[in-house]
């Protein structure tokens, strides 16, 4: 069992920055792939970024160069640093953990545990 708690969301103007945190407890976290996803009103949940056990990262095209995912295994925490934010980035952001083998998956069905989400609102 893994419990995830996101924090760091809020209201920011376009061009601003936010850092989201995903704190995990439970099963060994350091060896798992962790992903960030987001869901805007009326849209499906979509992949944003992931980091695997060795620190390799992958991003969806729309956030490349603006978002950075990182992990601190000593703190059981994964971060999503978001810069140059745009109104289109407005969504509820979720972190998720994949406990099965393999990594670098971008589909929601490949992740086993989810946090409750944190709202990010970018005003124009």
Image: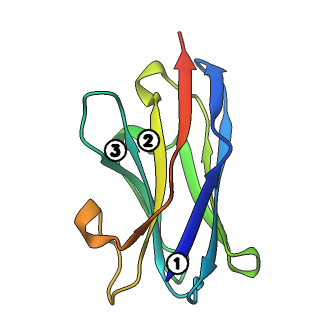
Q: Is residue 118 left or right of residue 112?
A: right
Closer to the chain start, of discs 2 and 1, is 1
- Distance between mark 2 and mark 1 Cα atoms: 27 Å
Name the element at disc 3.
helix
- Distance between mark 3 and mark 2 Cα atoms: 6 Å
Quadrant of the rendered image containing residue 15: top right
Q: Is residue 35 left or right of residue 76?
A: left
Name the element at disc 2.
helix
Farthest top residue in view: 124
Q: What residue is drawn where x is 65% and y is 30%?
A: 10
Relative height, residue 61 to residue 116 (above, below):
above
Relative height, residue 111 to residue 67 (above, below):
below
- The crowding category of the residue bearing disc 3, from other C-alpha atoms within 10 Å (few below 14, some 14 to 19, many at least 20), is few
- Distance between mark 3 and mark 1 Cα atoms: 29 Å
Q: What residue is drawn where x is 32% and y is 86%?
A: 102
- Which residue corresponds to mark 1? 2
Task: Judge by depth and name the residue closer to the eye, 80 or 97.
Answer: 97
- Which residue corresponds to mark 2? 63
- The crowding category of the residue bearing disc 1, from other C-alpha atoms within 10 Å (few below 14, some 14 to 19, many at least 20), is some
Asked if the residue at tag 1 contacts the one at tag 3, i.e. Cβ–Cβ closer than 8 Å, the answer is no
Asked if the residue at tag 2 contacts the one at tag 3, i.e. Cβ–Cβ closer than 8 Å, the answer is yes
Q: Position of residue 9 (x, y in %)?
A: 63, 38
Q: What residue is drawn where x is 52% and y is 78%?
A: 2
Relative height, residue 77 to residue 59 (above, below):
below
Disc marking residue 61: 3
Q: Position of residue 41 (x, y in %)?
A: 33, 27
Tally of numbered discs: 3
Task: Judge by depth and name the residue closer to the eye, 38 or 4.
Answer: 4
Quadrant of the rendered image containing residue 113: bottom left
Q: Position of residue 20 (x, y in %)?
A: 64, 48
Q: Position of residue 104 (x, y in %)?
A: 34, 72
Disc marking residue 112: none
């Amino acid at each position: 069992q893994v419990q995830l708690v996101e924090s760091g969301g809020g209201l920011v103007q376009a061009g601003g920055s936010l850092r989201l945190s995903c704190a995990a407890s439970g099963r060994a976290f350091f060896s798992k792939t962790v992903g960030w996803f987001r869901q805007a009103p009326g849209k499906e949940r979509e992949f944003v970024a992931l980091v695997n056990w060795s620190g390799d990262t992958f991003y969806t095209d729309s956030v490349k160069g603006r978002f950075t995912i990182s992990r601190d295994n000593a703190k059981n925490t994964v971060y999503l640093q978001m810069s140059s934010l745009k109104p289109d980035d407005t969504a509820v952001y979720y972190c998720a953990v994949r406990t099965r083998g393999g990594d670098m998956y971008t589909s929601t069905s490949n992740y086993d545990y989810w946090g409750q989400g944190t709202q990010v609102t970018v005003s124009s």
